[in-house]
Amino acid sequence: MASVKTPCILLIGTADTKSDELLFLRRCLEDGGGAALVMDVGILGKAPFEPEITNAAVAAAAGVTLAQLADIGDENAAMSLMAQGAVSLVSTLYTEGRIDGMLALGGTMGTDLALDAASALPVGVPKVVVSTIAYSHLVPPERIPADLIMLLWSGGLYGLNSLCRSSLAQAAGAILGACRLAQPPCFERPLVGITSLGSSVLSYMKRLKPALEARGYEVAVFHTTGMGGRVFESLAERGCFVAVFDFSLQELANHIGGSCVTAGASRLTGAGRAGIPQIVAPGATDMVDYPAWAAPPARLAGFPSHAHNRLIASSLCDHGLRCEIAREIADRLAAASGPCCLLLPQRGIEEWDRPGQALHDAAGLAAFVAALRGGVRAPTELVEIDAHINDAAFSDAALALFDRWVAAGRIVPGIAAGITASA
């Protein structure tokens, strides 16, 4: 249901150089029935109006003064400190219930700070960045919050014009609409996270989701094509799951294999750090994704590949890379602070590796299974399954382990009335 209260938007920018733009955005927000708190993140100049949150306050939140920032003599280092202050204040403002969303604008410098500020807000809180480098290759995927809205600041490098006003007004409308219609996750039932890669490559969630819902859980399935893994890790780190079925580790394979289709270096660490029970499988780690319209990573040039569509293709990993991936999986699981089990399907880990398919490599699979078997160590539990990851036998084994952990008190029981998991 849409919110009936006046949305309060945190408006972030450098008020010394972008005062006209910030004031225009404020008017747009107010004309649209919203309210704005302006946060000035400029360092050298004085704002020609009085922001609600001054640049001095932002600097103080980072433990420095504006004079100290100016004395650094390095704009990158100075703005990095301002970003720290902005992150601290954004977190406080949201926790105190003073803001409903965030709108920031900037060039490369302002966008750099804005990405950190947006990352301080949980998934489900509206966040919009108007940037001269929106969707640019300059912005690494791991810096982008999973639910961020970005708009290109057309003609917005220096001063207002009709193109610039159009971009800014659209951004104001986007953040107001998002705040009015936002439905933050309520987690009325215990939430279980499942990772997968589409439904044609990995299909176990088709069995797992209804079975878990029948046990009284809410289930969220994350598409592991970079940003999906990012939001999965973010929610895990915040303790939003009662358990995870992390069965598609393909983003980790991508990261190690040098692909741009990555969720960042922290993949397969969030649940472990938060102590969330995790049941893990090495789904789709025999291949590295890359843009179908570009060349594969140099290391995999000439290896068998499969084009899923015009956007994404996958190249088969060489045996050395597969063993490297296996070692990394084992090491990350060993660092987990909560219950952890690796389910190891012996007959295949994604649909295209079956006999007769484009990425079938029996010797590579055998080497990978052996590397995992030798690398997994206590306290990680290892369960080998004589099945393919997409077979019903694999899903059944996963559910049996889940039920055993529920019965042992490791996982919070579901709350559906009259339904209990099998022991």
Image: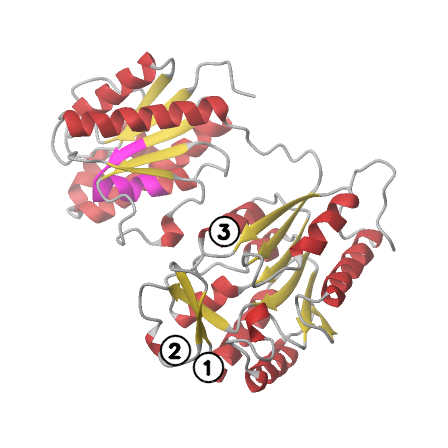
Q: Which residues are magenta?
A: 104-115
Question: Who comes first in sequence, dot 1 or dot 3?
Answer: 3
In this figure, which colouring scheme has been used for the structure? secondary structure
Q: Amino acid at mark 1?
A: Asp
Residues at marks 1 and 3 touching, judged by CB atoms closer than 8 Å: no
Where does residue 357 sit, x and y in percent of width and height? 55, 76
Q: Between residues 15 and 148, which one lies in front from this camera angle?
A: 148
Q: Is residue 36 above or below residue 141?
A: above
What distance separates the C-alpha of mark 1 from that of mark 3?
25 Å
Residue tagged 2: 300
Residue tagged 1: 318
Q: Between residues 416 and 408, which one lies in front from this camera angle?
A: 416
Q: Secondary structure at mark 1?
A: loop
Where does residue 44 sit, x and y in percent of width and height? 15, 34
What distance separates the C-alpha of mark 1 from that of mark 2?
7 Å
Q: Which residue extends farthest front?
A: 356
Left or right, 131 with respect to 358, comes to left
